[in-house]
């Protein structure tokens, strides 16, 4: 392997090795055939030397080298009629051509080389029994083309296999990166929803407790109890979320926090304790929803009310659930100002990502009469598999 790499950087040396090797391999055959045909051995070997000399330039001008070897071989046949040695140099030159050009060109060159060789033999040896010698020249020339074509085809096949493997590896890396990015977004959404919601409630309840501590200690004590309960719930949700990350989705011990609209009453009650007057309206057939749609609807309401309580300065909000045969429409209205103007905007981004994940749509904008409105359209049937 090291020798091959070394010779690859020195094509002139490779040509020299090939020319000398061809001469050394063909010399015993040439000497033996000359002896059997009672021809001068030195002339046979000398003719062989002349045919191998053009191979010194085979890397630079492969087709021209084929023409040169054919001319020398044909001339040798005409000068020495019964020294029909195998055209080894021509076969090597044709191998080089077939290894470097397309198949059609290689075979055309091979046929073009065989024709003058056969013609030279038939002219110098018109006896019918010498037809086998002519056919042998054809076989040698075509053998060189076939061998070179096989080597080139194998090299191209290996190159295509390597290219496909590299492309597949690249595609796997892209897919893995995409899945990692999606998982990071999912984790970020879940942590944002859990932390932002509970911290907002804790902050609001702490403000109530601080305000009532001197004037109404009993209500302040109740606010502190709700802070304690909210903090415990936040810790449980965070522990469950981190447990999913540690154990993996396929673990039997993984516990995924997956609330739904059945828990909407507790959610609304927590906001009422924090000072936000929330009403809930329901219409249509409230049949069972797909788990992912149910979770998404809950998170949309949770995030919208959290933004309302934290940024909008609203006194009241209204949640409407409109169950339709093919979809669920969730609408949250408040009487405050634009909640996106006072936050980082990650809440709205997270809501859009959640809705998109189930194939729905979301619109969040200010109302003409004042306040802010979030409307989500969620399909009641979804073929997507997921969870949080």
Image (cartoon, rainbow, N blue to C red):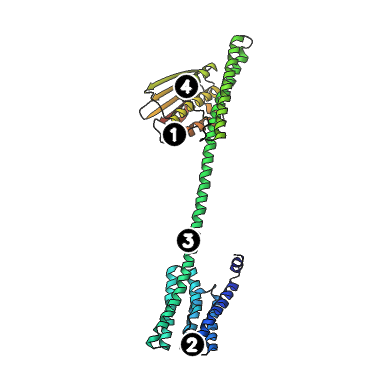
Q: Earlier in the sequence, mark 4 or mark 1?
A: 4
Tell me if label 1 and label 2 are in contact, CB under 8 Å.
Answer: no
Give the vertical position of 184 relative to 228 (above or below): below
Q: Is residue 12 left or right of residue 298?
A: right
Q: Earlier in the sequence, mark 3 or mark 4?
A: 3
Tell me if label 3 and label 1 are in contact, CB under 8 Å.
Answer: no
Q: Which residue is mark 4?
A: 264
Q: Pick the residue in front: 116 or 251.
A: 251
Q: Is residue 386 left or right of residue 11?
A: left
Give the distance between the C-alpha atoms of the residues marked 3 and 4, in whole angstroms.
62 Å
Q: Earlier in the sequence, mark 2 or mark 3?
A: 2
Give the distance between the C-alpha atoms of the residues marked 4 and 2, in whole angstroms.
106 Å
Of the numbered discs in the image, which one, if any, rests on residue 249? none
Q: Which residue is mark 1?
A: 358
Q: Nearer the viewer, mark 3 or mark 4?
A: 3
Q: Which residue is mark 2?
A: 36
Q: Position of residue 369 (x, y in %)?
A: 45, 22
Q: Position of residue 183 (x, y in %)?
A: 53, 37
Q: Pick the residue in front: 3 or 67.
A: 3
Q: Earlier in the sequence, mark 4 or mark 2?
A: 2
Bin the neighbour count of mark 1 within 10 Å (Cα to Cα): few under 14, some 14-19, many 20 and up: many
């Amino acid at each position: 392997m090291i020798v091959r790499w070394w010779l690859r950087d020195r094509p002139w040396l490779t040509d020299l090795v090939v020319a000398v090797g061809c001469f050394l391999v063909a010399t015993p055959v040439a000497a033996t055939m000359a002896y059997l045909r009672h021809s001068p051995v030195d002339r046979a070997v000398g003719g062989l030397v002349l045919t191998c000399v053009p191979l010194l330039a085979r890397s630079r001008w492969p087709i021209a080298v084929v023409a040169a070897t054919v001319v020398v071989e044909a001339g040798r046949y005409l000068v020495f009629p019964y020294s029909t040695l195998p055209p080894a140099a021509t076969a090597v030159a044709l191998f080089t051509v077939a290894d470097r050009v397309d198949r059609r060109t290689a075979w055309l060159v091979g046929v073009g080389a065989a024709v003058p060789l056969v013609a030279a033999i038939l002219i110098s040896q018109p006896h019918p029994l010498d037809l086998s010698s002519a056919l042998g020249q054809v076989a040698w020339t075509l053998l060189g083309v076939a061998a070179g074509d096989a080597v080139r085809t194998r090299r191209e096949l290996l190159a295509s296999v390597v290219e496909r493997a590299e492309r597949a590896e690249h595609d796997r890396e892209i897919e893995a990166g995409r899945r990692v990015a999606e998982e990071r977004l999912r984790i970020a959404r879940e942590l944002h929803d859990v932390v932002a919601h509970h911290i907002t409630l804790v902050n609001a309840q702490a403000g109530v407790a601080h305000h009532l501590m001197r004037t109404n200690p009993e209500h302040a004590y109740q606010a502190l109890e709700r802070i304690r309960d909210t903090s415990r719930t936040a810790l449980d949700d965070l522990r469950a979320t981190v447990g999913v990350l540690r154990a993996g989705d396929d673990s039997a011990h993984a516990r995924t926090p997956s609330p739904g609209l059945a828990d909407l009453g507790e959610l609304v009650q927590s906001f009422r304790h924090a000072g936000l007057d929330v009403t809930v309206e329901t219409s249509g057939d409230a049949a069972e929803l797909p788990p992912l749609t149910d979770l998404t609807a809950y998170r949309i309401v949770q995030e919208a009310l959290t933004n309302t309580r934290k940024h909008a300065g609203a006194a009241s909000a209204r949640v409407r659930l409109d169950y339709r045969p093919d979809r669920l429409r969730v609408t949250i209205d408040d009487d405050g100002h634009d909640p996106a103007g006072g936050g980082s905007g990650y809440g709205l981004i997270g809501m859009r990502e959640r809705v998109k994940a189930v194939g729905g749509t979301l619109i969040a904008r200010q109302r003409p009469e004042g306040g802010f409105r979030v409307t989500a359209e969620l399909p009641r049937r979804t073929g997507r598999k997921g969870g949080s």
